[in-house]
Image (cartoon, grey):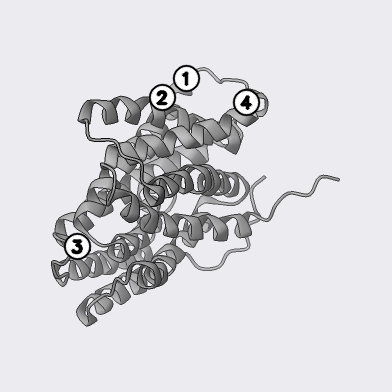
Amino acid sequence: MRIKPDPRLALLIATLLWASSFIALKLAFQVYPPNWVIAGRMLVALLCFSLFYKQILKFQYRSGDWKLLLLMSFCEPCLYFVLESQALLYTSASQAGMMTAMAPILTAIVAYVFIKERLNRRGMLGFLLAMVGVIWLSLAGESDEHAPNPLLGNLLELAAMLAAAIYAVCLKLLCQRYSALTLTALQALVGSLFFVPLALYSGGEWQLHRDGLLAILYLGAFVTLGAYLLYNYAISQIPLTQAVVYINLIPVFTLVLAFVLLGERLTPWQMLGAGLVLIGVVIAQPKKSTQQPEH
């Protein structure tokens, strides 16, 4: 009997990897232009996926799915990484990590609009409260070496979360017909085709830098390959609303990692704003259900 990995453990590891990506991106952006970093990240992931090409190509395309596949890939990695890379030029890794707390609520709203999943008053109240926290966190930000323009950076990260929400809904619909490995490999392929020409067009001076290259290798092999593969697998196994709840762990992991590795600190007012975001997210969570996991 074949034993399947626990989807909740997969989500836990994925969120930890995603939280660490904010740190790795900050380090890589100190050496290389954002487009170069993302292009390198996509190419590393694509190279890793090439080792599994036989399993990846085992799928049957359903007519008309190109629209969903295109929208999924455009939202993430293309639009998502463009917005996030720009956001991290203006805000700190810890504040950007806090913005990820909005992803579950935004996903619920997008799911309601596109696939008619129910969004109750509790969810709307939590969304509004979390939005107040996001605005508070951003306005309370002080310009420093880590965050030269926190308001702009946080708004860009929030837009990235909206792209991630659309991606999650598309993924939930597609994972019923395609494997997590195939869908994640498609993201790496589309990301490479999008970001490599963009990086070449944007120009820049290449230099060998150990820490910068290690950060790119980590982002490609562990985050783009590992985190997305684990997340996509989990979404194929359990309801979407249960899976996205785990994204709430990213801000916590990011705050700890940014403090330990980058020396970033939030001001007391920002801590209050961050707390408001988390309270709003908790309020927005659906009550425990007896719904059985999807297979």
In the image, what residue type sits under mark 4?
Tyr
- Residue 89, above or below 248: above
What residue would you read off at disc 1? 64
Query: Where does residue 237 sit, x and y in percent of width and height?
Result: 63, 48
- Residue 72, above or below 239: above
What residue would you read off at disc 2? 67
Quadrant of residue 197 within the rendered picture: top left
The residues bearing labels 4 and 2 have C-alpha atoms spaced at a distance of 23 Å
Check disc 1 and report its element: helix, strand or loop: loop
Quarter holding the N terminus is top right
The residues bearing labels 4 and 1 have C-alpha atoms spaced at a distance of 23 Å
Tell me the tag on residue 147. 3
Tell me the tag on residue 53. 4
Can you tell which of label 3 and label 1 is closer to the viewer? 3
- Most distant residue in the right direction: 1
Q: Is residue 151 left or right of residue 99?
A: left
Question: Could you tell me which residue is drawn at 61 percent across and 34 percent down?
Answer: 179
The residues bearing labels 1 and 2 have C-alpha atoms spaced at a distance of 6 Å
The residues bearing labels 3 and 1 have C-alpha atoms spaced at a distance of 44 Å
Can you tell which of label 4 and label 1 is closer to the viewer? 4
Tell me the tag on residue 5. none
